[in-house]
């Protein structure tokens, strides 16, 4: 379905010395630096796979996705998406793909959502009956009914994201690229969005490529992950081995009532460590380092030794995970 071989993309960046003198000099004689954003990347994705494409900021995710969409031309290498070379045949490629790019909207800002969908129907030449059925389904699954008469600019972030997702899947594309589809959303909307993506994949065998910094998105949606670091793939495989190694590595943030001589309880040595400690605001974050003790036991031990006002549990950051895989391998 998606075939990527020895794919590279370089950007030419104009270098400028600081200040006015630097600006003048750059006008007369430009100095360029080459940024190797994507370096010799290879992967094959089969129809119906749901793949997490993850990496730290600036790793090369968007550059890869833009090449898959045909927005960017590779510096070298091969790409085909459903047999089409995206940058050579953007029009036909566009018919096969749908996309949600976090901050951008593909809906028309000032007109009601329903009319945006109607325009997309014409752009993608969706048969009327199919369009009606699809829209009825999405309206039900994503609770769109009250949103359809409203212009996008008046929608909340969560409402807008539900409408964007529907727009991306409306023409039943073979592949959908999703860039941070749940960022900034509350838990209930996140759950709905994840369910919707999984349902579409099941119904139509849609291939999904997801870039996200949210571990929960990856765990719940993807069966495979590809990790990119500084333009190079450092892991491509199933999610299980990542979960086995990192699944337990949660963070627990505690708000303490008092912070007198806060130190890690002896019982937790070897099972958790203090990641950060802010005595002024009486906050401490523990990182769980071993599978051998449950999160509940760690919390119970802390509650035994300290007066806890509040606590939250979080997944490790993708950046930490990438760094560990990069440094130690799997
Ligand atoms: N148009 C551009 N011109 C020059 N350099 C660019 C351009 N777009 C991206 N880059 C650089 O290429 C590298 C990869 O960027 P890319 O946007 O692909 O990263 P990313 O993994 O999507 O990051 P993020 O998670 O922050 O979106 C970065 O170092 C970035 O600064």
Image (cartoon, grey):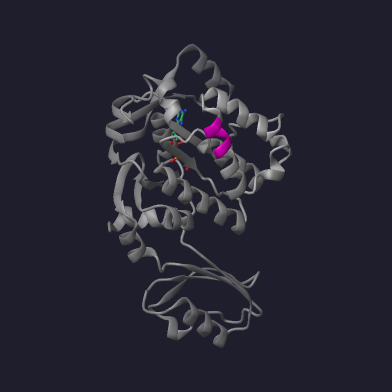
Q: Main secondary structure of the magenta part?
A: helix
Q: Position of residue 166 (x, y in %)?
A: 56, 40
Is 36 in front, or is 101?
Answer: 101
Looking at this view, name the residue that lies furthest to the front: 129
Residue 177 to residue 214: above or below: above
Relative placement, left or right, of 294 versus 324 is right
Q: Which of the four quarters of the rendered structure image does ligand 1 lie in?
A: top left
Q: Nearer the viewer, residue 232 or 185?
A: 185
Residue 72: x %, y % from top left: 42, 25
Q: Residue at x 35, y 46 (%)?
A: 49
Quarter occupied by the N terminus: top left
Q: Which quadrant does the C terminus fall into?
A: bottom left
Is the residue 251 above or below the residue 38 in the image? below
Q: Residue furthest top?
A: 28
Q: Which residue range is magenta in the image?
A: 129-133
Whether residue 264 is visible, yes or no, is: no
Magenta stretch contains residue 82: no
x 70%, y 42%: residue? 147
Q: Is residue 131 magenta?
A: yes
- 308 relative to 70 in the view: left or right: right
């Amino acid at each position: 379905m998606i075939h990527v071989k020895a794919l590279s993309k370089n950007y030419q960046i104009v270098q400028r010395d600081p200040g006015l003198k630097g600006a003048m000099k750059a006008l007369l004689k430009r100095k360029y630096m080459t940024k190797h954003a994507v370096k010799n990347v290879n992967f094959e994705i089969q129809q119906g796979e749901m793949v997490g494409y993850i990496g730290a900021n600036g790793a090369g995710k968007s550059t890869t996705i833009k090449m898959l969409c045909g927005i960017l031309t590779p510096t070298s290498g091969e790409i085909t998406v459903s047999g089409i070379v995206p940058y050579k045949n953007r029009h036909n490629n566009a018919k096969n793909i749908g996309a949600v790019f976090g901050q951008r909207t593909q809906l028309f800002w000032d007109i009601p959502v329903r009319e945006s969908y109607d325009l997309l129907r014409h752009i993608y030449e969706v048969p009327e009956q199919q369009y009606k059925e699809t829209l009825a389904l999405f309206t039900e699954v994503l609770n769109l009914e009250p949103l359809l008469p409203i212009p996008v600019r008046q929608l909340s972030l969560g409402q807008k994201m539900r409408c964007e997702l529907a727009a991306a899947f409306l023409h039943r594309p073979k592949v959908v690229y999703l860039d941070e589809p749940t960022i900034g959303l509350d838990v209930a909307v996140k759950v709905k969005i994840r369910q919707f993506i999984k349902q579409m994949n099941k119904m139509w065998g849609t291939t999904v490529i997801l870039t996200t910094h949210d571990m929960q998105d990856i765990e719940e949606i993807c069966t495979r992950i590809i990790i990119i670091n500084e333009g190079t793939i450092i892991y491509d495989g199933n999610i299980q081995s990542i979960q086995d190694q990192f699944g337990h590595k949660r963070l627990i943030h505690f708000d303490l009532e008092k912070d007198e001589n806060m130190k890690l309880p002896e019982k937790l040595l070897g099972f958790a460590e203090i990641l950060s400690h802010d005595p002024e605001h009486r906050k401490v974050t523990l990182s769980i380092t071993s599978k051998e003790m449950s999160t509940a036991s760690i919390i119970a031990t802390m509650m035994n030794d300290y007066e806890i006002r509040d606590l939250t549990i979080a997944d490790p950051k993708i950046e930490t995970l990438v760094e560990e895989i990069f440094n130690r391998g799997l």
